[in-house]
Amino acid sequence: NSPTVTTTLKNLGALYRRQGKFEAAETLEEAAMRSRKQASMKIHLNELRLCDVLNDPESIEKRRSRESLNVDVVKYESGPDGGEEVSMSVEWNGV
């Protein structure tokens, strides 16, 4: 179902047609069309799933919750063992 396979099938069908191998050409061209339709359907289904996720109330609430977090301060300090420690101040605005 890759675009490369679809193009190859189509091109090979065109070559067979020029050579007069009409039955083989037709078979390859039909396979190319089926492959293209399947790829198109997969893209459409993925778009529908994406719309469902974006419109899902739970998903919207999670995005709002993440957007409501404000990272005010990030500090890098030397730890007791000589390594680096990171501390962060986070504020939630309640949205």
Image (spheres, grey):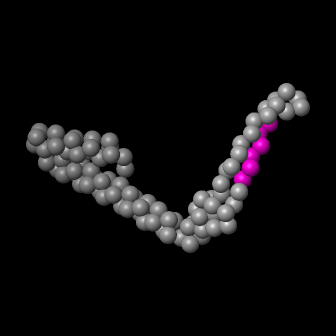
- Residue 49: x and y in percent read 47, 64
Using residue 92 as the reference point, say whether residue 84 is left or right of it. right
Q: What span is in magenta?
A: 85-90
- State how many labels appear: 0
Q: Residue at x 71, y 45 (%)?
A: 73
Extreme-right residue of the structure: 80
Q: Is residue 88 magenta?
A: yes
Can you name the residue that lies furthest to the bottom here? Answer: 57
On the picture, is 21 further left or further right than 31? left
Foreground residue among 59 and 82: 82
Which quadrant of the view contains residue 60?
bottom right
The residue most toward the top is 82
**Left or right placement of residue 3 versus residue 94 in this view:** left
The front one of 43 and 17 is: 43
- Considering only vertical position in the picture, is 89 above or below 62? above
Residue 5 vs residue 82, the one in the foreground:
82
Magenta-colored segment: predominant secondary structure: strand
Pinpoint residue 80: horizontal percent, then vertical percent. Answer: 89, 31
Image point (22%, 41%), residue name: 12
In the image, residue 94 above or below residue 71: below
Task: Judge whether residue 22 is colored magenta.
Answer: no
Quadrant position of the C terminus in the picture: bottom right
In x, y percent, where is residue 3?
33, 46
Q: Is residue 49 visible?
A: no
Determine whether 25 is above or below 69 in the image. above
Residue depicted at x 49% and y 69%: 55
Q: Quadrant of residue 10?
A: top left
Residue 36 placed where, x, y %?
30, 54
